Amino acid sequence: MENPDTDPPGFALYRLYQDDYSRRHEMFVPSHLKDDLEAESKRRFKEKEAEQDKVTAMEKAQAREEAISSFRASESTDSGPDNSFKSKDQIELEKATQAWARIDESDRTRSSRHRYPVFKSEQALVLRKRLSKSDGDERARLDQTYQELVHAGTTLREIARPKSLKSLETLAQKQPHMKEAVAFVMAQINLARCSQKPVRLQPMLLVGEAGVGKTHFAQALAQALSTTIHIQALDSDLTSSVFLGSDRHWGNSQHGVLFETVVLGQHANPIIVLDEIDKPSRSMSYASPVSSLYSVLEPVSAKGVRDISLMFEFDASQVTWIATANTAMYLDPPLRSRFREFHIMPPTAAECLVLAEEVMRASIQSVGIKGFKPDVSLRRHLAHLPARQIYQLTLEAVANAVAADRKELCRGDFPGWLFEDEAGGQGGKVTQYLH
């Protein structure tokens, strides 16, 4: 083609993916046919996704039932002559050992590139031993954590992966000023598919002024990758215990974010957002929350991190770390070197309109009201605002619309000052937006 940016008259570019999305074919088809092909492709994706979700749910339910049956079988075992001189805790520990041995056997048959072992059963037994030696609030806390491990019935956690590369392409279209970061993610996914290994994304650092949508992008990326997300704000008074737990000698000791998200969570590769990582780095205090990040950001050392509150070792090497900062100059160089750095420029006027519409739709979707329609024409009055403010104003507008028994937004649902550009502005001065 002489001009690759322009489709031939009467034709449109159509991308056809293979089932595993590792390759795609591009072709020009008649314009009227493209919509039908894309609709058929979406239908197939949804059918396949529903089938996969059904199989996964059945496997998880079966594993949970097997684990619970194992524990019940162990608990129902009568104490024979050999147990007559054993304490109750010794007998219970032996039952737990047998049950976790059954879980290990089951996990060996279920392990695959889509399920990842995040801890070893020995760690659960260590926790069980500590439980028997504790009392009071400490015992209750450890027992609750141990029961959650038992209920999961497996040491494996799902490796989340995008249902299609189209979700990432759509993300790049909706947030065009983030195209470089999206391209990086897609390259990492393609590399993992070629190597037949789980998708592990290199830690990313998004640097840009406040309001360019760094945190909103991380949330949208988690949705595109079909994984869970935890956003940890670092601009408040936190200590290093936030990620790997507090010292167990404290009366209010708690396990950390990593244990909660990985071991007690659904996915081995959740996204953890380090929001405003440059704020605590300005302090030289040894207790800064970023002091515990040096090891967990390295895949080798992250394979054996330890939560000091539980003395529980687990594998956090698959976690996707995304840090945001207004400036990277305050970061310690060794910490900064662990990230792939992206400098996010403020979106152009055209990109502001696209981003405003995307944030409005995300805000409306978060409410969960079926059939609610956004008025896209209102985006120009919001596009100059930070993404966070657009999100909040849209939520308020939706609440006002629902109170008026409507399922669509109108100008009256938003604050009047948003429309001062048309009304003459403050003091009669007309405000002209670039968009």
Image (cartoon, rainbow, N blue to C red):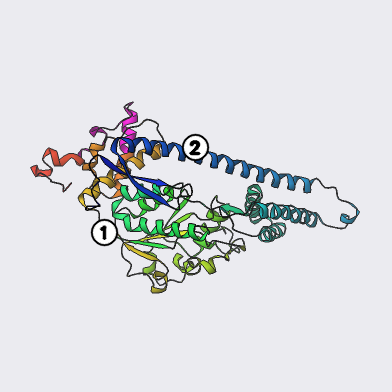
The residue under the point 33% across, 51% down is 172
Q: Is residue 388 above or below residue 343?
A: above
Name the quadrant containing residue 51. Answer: top right
Pick the front one: 198 or 246: 198
What kind of residue is marked 2?
Answer: Glu
Q: Residue furthest front?
A: 1
What kind of residue is marked 1?
Answer: Met
Membership of 314 in magenta stretch: no
Q: Read off the residue under disc 1.
A: 345
Q: Residue furthest left?
A: 428
Pick the front one: 407 or 2: 2
Q: Secondary structure at mark 1?
A: loop
Q: Read off the residue under disc 2.
A: 47
Q: Which range is magenta?
A: 396-416
Pick the front one: 79 or 374: 374
Q: In terms of sequence position, does the residue under pointer 1 or pointer 2 come before the other?
A: 2
Q: Is residue 171 left or right of residue 10?
A: right
Q: Residues within 10 Å of mark 2 (few under 14, many from 20)?
A: few
The Cα atoms of the two marked residues, 1 and 2, are separated by 39 Å
What is the x, y in percent for residue 169?
Answer: 36, 49
The residue under the point 16% across, 41% down is 420
Q: Is residue 211 visible?
A: no
Q: Nearer the viewer, mark 1 or mark 2?
A: 2
Q: Residue furthest top?
A: 405
Q: Is residue 86 left or right of residue 109?
A: right
Residue 226 is tagged as none
What is the x, y in percent for residue 183?
Answer: 36, 57
Q: Secondary structure at mark 2?
A: helix
- Marks 1 & 2, CB-CB < 8 Å contact: no
